[in-house]
Amino acid sequence: MDLNEYQILTQATLLEKNGPSLLNAGLGLSGESGEVADLIKKHLFHNKWVTKEELLLEIGDVLYYVALAASSLNTTLADVAEMNIRKLWKRYPEKAQAYLDTLSETDAVNKSVYLEQ
Ligand SMILES: [Mg+2]
């Protein structure tokens, strides 16, 4: 599924009457991140078997609130993702270049835009 399509589909379940709220998104993101951490904690320290599906469902809940946060700031998940890649590639240019070196020349040229400021 495309990130922006997902973001649009999340709007169907929006509870806020006046559009997505950054406060709801931030609090929800914190809570759902805590649920992911709690599953990992239970697995490591409480000897509880945690399935991949359980983890993925909670990670999906995190993604929901990331989408809500992006919507509340009138931006898209794809824009957030691109900004993050640019930030990471600026921080780790040698790793980005090593990745680009594995690609075909055309793909490398297309993806090298993320190295630009
Ligand atoms: Mg959850």
Image (cartoon, rainbow, N blue to C red):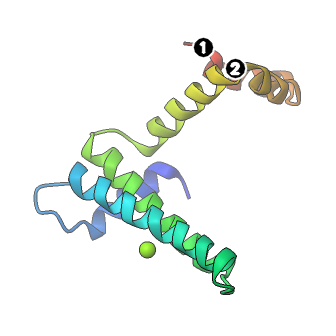
Q: Position of residue 87 (x, y in %)?
A: 56, 26
Q: Which residue is mark 1?
A: 116
Q: What number of labels is visible?
A: 2
Q: Position of residue 52 (x, y in %)?
A: 68, 76
Q: Residues within 10 Å of mark 1 (few under 14, many from 20)?
A: few
**Which residue lies most toward the front here?**
45
Q: Position of residue 78 (x, y in %)?
A: 48, 41
Mark 1 residue's CB less than 8 Å from ligand 1: no
Left or right of 39 on screen, residue 26: left
| Residue at x-position 41% and y-position 61% | 64
Task: Report how far apart the C-alphas of labels 1 and 2 lie in the structure.
Answer: 7 Å
| Residue at x-position 69% and y-position 20% | 112
73 above or below 90?
below
Quadrant the N terminus occupies? bottom right
Q: Which residue is mark 2?
A: 112
What amino acid type should be assigned to the residue bearing mark 1?
Glu
115 above or below 51?
above
**Which residue lies most toward the left here?**
18
Left or right of 46 on screen, residue 60: left
**Depth order, front residue of 1/61:** 61
**Depth order, front residue of 28/21:** 28
- Whether the residues at callouts 1 and 2 have beta carbons within 8 Å, the answer is yes
Q: Residues within 10 Å of mark 2 (few under 14, many from 20)?
A: some
Q: Position of residue 104 (x, y in %)?
A: 86, 27
Under tag 1, what secondary structure? loop
What amino acid type should be assigned to the residue bearing mark 2?
Ser
Q: Would you identify the image quadrant in which residue 89 lies?
A: top right
Left or right of 75 on screen, residue 82: right
